[in-house]
Structures are given as C-alpha cells and as structure tokens.
Amino acid sequence: MKLSTALLALALSLGCALVPAVAPAHAQRAETTQAILERGQNEYDDLRFQEALQTFSAALVRAGNTPQDLARIYRYLALTYLSLDRRDEAEGAYRSLLGLMPDTMPGSDMSPRFREFFTQVRARWEADGRPGLPPPAPVSIVHRSPAQAEREHPVTLTASLEDPDHRAASLVLAYRQGTNAVFQRLEMSRDDEGTFSATIPASAVSPPLVEYYFEAIDAGGLPIAGRGDVAAPLRIAVPAPGGDITSEPGFWIAIGGGALVLIGGAIAIGVVVSNQSPANGTLVFTIND
C-alpha cells in the first residue's frame, strides 16, 4: 500500500506529529459556559437529575462566570438538589442565589412544594440578616495524571488541595469508562500528609480510555473548585489486548518534522494544530488496505 502524494504533502505542510488515537490524560477542549448551562437545563427538564447536577456543578467552578451566569447556576442547583431530596444542599444553593440577587422570589412556575421550601429558606436568610455572598478565596486541586492504565486493573489516583481558607470539606473523584456513561462519584480519603486518594475499580478500566475529574466540595455540599469536569474530563488511555503499539520503535517512521505510524494494516498520520488557533485539536487521517 502506498500513501498518496497529496495526503503526504498535506500532512507535511501542517507540520504533522504523530499522536496516539487516544491522547492520554489530558483535558478536552471545553464547552462554553452557555453550552454547559443549556445542556444542564435540558437534563433537568428531562428529569435526569443526577446528570444535571454534574453539569451545573461543572459550570459553577468555571472561570469567568458573570453574576447572571452564577445566578442561573445556583437556581438550577437548588432545584436539582431539591428534586433529589437533598434539602441542605438545596438551601445552600438558594442562599447563594439570594446573596447574589437579593430580590429573588420563588417563581409561580415552581410546584407548591418547591415554592414553600424556598419561601422558608428566604425567611431564614432574612432572619440571618440577609447575608451576601463573600468573594471566595481561590482553591486549587493539584494532580498529576497517569499516562495510561493496564486493562482490567484498578487505578489509584491522588490529589492535594491548595486551600488557604480551608473552605473544602471533601474532595470527590468522578469517573467513567469511555465517553458516554454517567460519571460515578467517590469521596476521596485523606491521609495525615494531606494527600487525597481514591481507586477507580478494575471493572471500569477497559479500552480505549477512562475519563475522570475532581471536585472540591464545601461544608454546604456545593462545588468550589474542579480539575477537569463533566464537559472537559481528564483521560487515561487503556491499551487494547496486545499492549500499546505506539511504544514499539519498529512501528514508527520519521518524516521530516513529523512522523507516520504503521498500525496493523493501516497507516495513520496525526496532525497537531497550534493551540493558538480557534479550531485547535487533532486531525487523524487513516488509509486502510
């Protein structure tokens, strides 16, 4: 089989460099906040409350949220938590909404049960002196992703927090096999040194990849920081049986500034587009026998 001259010229003109079909342990290009909010609202309207909770939690810890974005996020978090009968978290989210938008009242579009709950929350908030939402001290999650994982073997992940005001009450690991399942959540354990750890079970570690992210949760049950999220998770490559073929030197052929890799009966060219381009990403051309 011969690679066409035109395709080779295209690859070289773009400065191609081989990348694996599944890039290990990296965050995917993020959706916009508005796109995430629309997705979360659709999930809520479809009564997919667990998925909506993950989506709105991801939106909450995004940088650059406007007050209007935050108000919308807190409102839907409050509704979602209450739909899941998690009343303490629902109250915390609604109080955060009131701190941003003090004139907020339970809408007539809510069910009587929801309207009564949020009316009571507002009364308690007013009795507490109508506290505002203080500017949050930044919280960072420090983590180094593994390059890849062995199929059907558990993967233990570790992380630490940079949390000067001690706002975080817990750290959660969310994981899934592949790219379509609902994320499963694990509360991470903390050792005496302040390092958090949790293990992705072997049953979730199968080709081609595992996706995961972290969330720091405050005492009220609300997310205050993330590393990756439901819309842009971190990834761990999981090679198929037979091992990671890209680690075999015999499968690589250097071409100028780029490379070709022979995979079975196909030749694949990976093209890395500059991260400064608005359409950054990876293009993969494959020609089969």
Image (cartoon, rainbow, N blue to C red):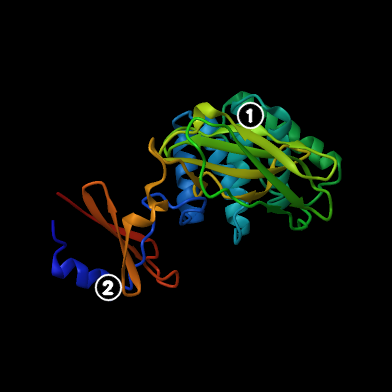
- The image shows residue 119, relative to residue 285, as above or below, that is above
Amino acid found under the numbered disc labelled 1: Leu
| Residue 142 appearing in the image | yes
Residues under labels 1 and 2: Cα distance?
A: 55 Å
Residue receiving disc 1:
82
In the rendering, at what x and y percent does residue 128 appear? Answer: 86, 42
On the rendered structure, is 44 left or right of 132?
left
In the image, residue 80 sits, relative to residue 33, either above or below, namely above
Q: Position of residue 144 (x, y in %)?
A: 63, 52
- 267 is higher (above) or lower (below) than 259: above
Q: Position of residue 108 (x, y in %)?
A: 57, 34
| Disc 2: which residue | 12
Question: Who's the residue at 68% across and 44% down the image?
Answer: 158
Camera sees residue 72: no
Task: Answer with mark 1 or mark 2, whichever residue precedes in sequence.
Answer: 2
Q: Residues within 10 Å of mark 2 (few under 14, many from 20)?
A: some
Please report the residue visible at 46 percent of the width from the left and 57 percent of the height from the top. 29
| Relative depth, front residue between 72 and 2 | 2
Question: Mark on residue 16?
Answer: none
User: Residue 96 or 269: which is nearer the viewer?
Assistant: 269
Q: Nearer the viewer, residue 249 or 6?
A: 249
Q: Nearer the viewer, residue 217 or 93?
A: 217
Residue 65 appears left or right of 242: right
Q: Residue at x 26, y 69 (%)?
A: 11
